[in-house]
Amino acid sequence: MLDLMGTHQQTDGVRLCHGRDHGHGRRFGVWSLGLTVAMVLAGAGCSFVASLGGDTAGERGEIRLLFINNTPNLVVFTAGMYDPLDEVSVPAIVQFGFDGAGLTLPPDSESTIGTLPCARVFSVGGSRLLSLAEANREALALLPESSVVGVNFFAEADEGSEAEPTLDGSALSFEAQLGADFPCGALLIVRFEFNDVGDSPFRVDFDLIPPDSTR
């Protein structure tokens, strides 16, 4: 059963928070398919017409991802790419969690730019993505704190404390569709913000830079 939860927000411009200290990126490391994601995509049954990129028939291109945290909280979530009609393949995911030895997104920071294979849906905390990941648990080293629907925002424990971070609130999940919302080869920019309207205290914003952009 196809279950796509989340809100879809798009903005007209691209805001990259110029002037941010990019030294934070060293904490995350350069992430790619070989680090925290796994994928074997056959594309069986997909009837969508948007191009999956690649230079030859049957080959997939890539999308680039940048995550920007504009909150004073540690952001914990799962993001990834999947084909909604493909019940067999392992989704391509990346998880940000608590452990500084892995990928983390601390307060007022941004990730390095990583890449994932292009697929029909890009998801941040979507129920369908999490369901596919859970079904392929043996192929994916899932983080328990990150394997939840939506996005969680935590207050970090004091330095030197052994206590775990405290949950301050959550944001609804977000999904974007290939073709309608982004092309393969684009840089997708995900920003985590305070939410001034609605019931959720935080929100997920989405921008992109197209592959042929000169910016």
Image (cartoon, helix red, strand yellow):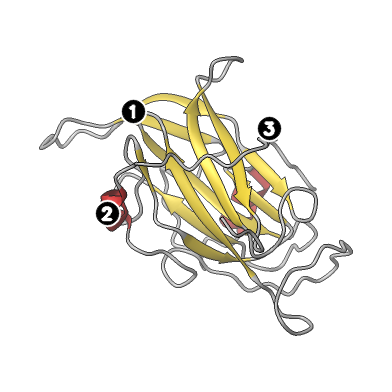
The residue labelled by disc 2 is 27
* Label 1–label 2 contact, CB within 8 A: no
Task: Give the amino acid at mark 2.
Answer: Arg
Residue 174 image offset from top left, x and y in percent: 63, 39
Left or right side of 63 for 48: right
Q: Identify the element where label 2 is drawn.
A: helix
Q: Identify the element where label 3 is drawn.
A: loop
Task: Give the amino acid at mark 3.
Answer: Thr
**Gap between marks 3 and 1, in whole Å?**
22 Å
Q: Identify the element where label 1 is drawn.
A: loop
Tell me where residue 142 sits by quadrant. bottom left
The outermost residue toward the left is 160
Closest to the observer, 146 or 18: 18
Name which residue lies at 32% across and 61% down. 29
Indicate whether 45 appears above or below 124. Answer: below
Disc 1 residue crowd, few under 14, some 14–19, many 20+, Cα 10 Å:
some
Task: Give the amino acid at mark 1.
Answer: Pro
The residue labelled by disc 1 is 72
Residue 95 image offset from top left, x and y in percent: 45, 52
Indicate whether 199 appears above or below 210. Answer: above
Label whose residue precedes the other's in the sequence (1 or 2): 2
Name which residue lies at 71% across and 80% down. 59
Indicate whether 91 appears above or below 181. Answer: below
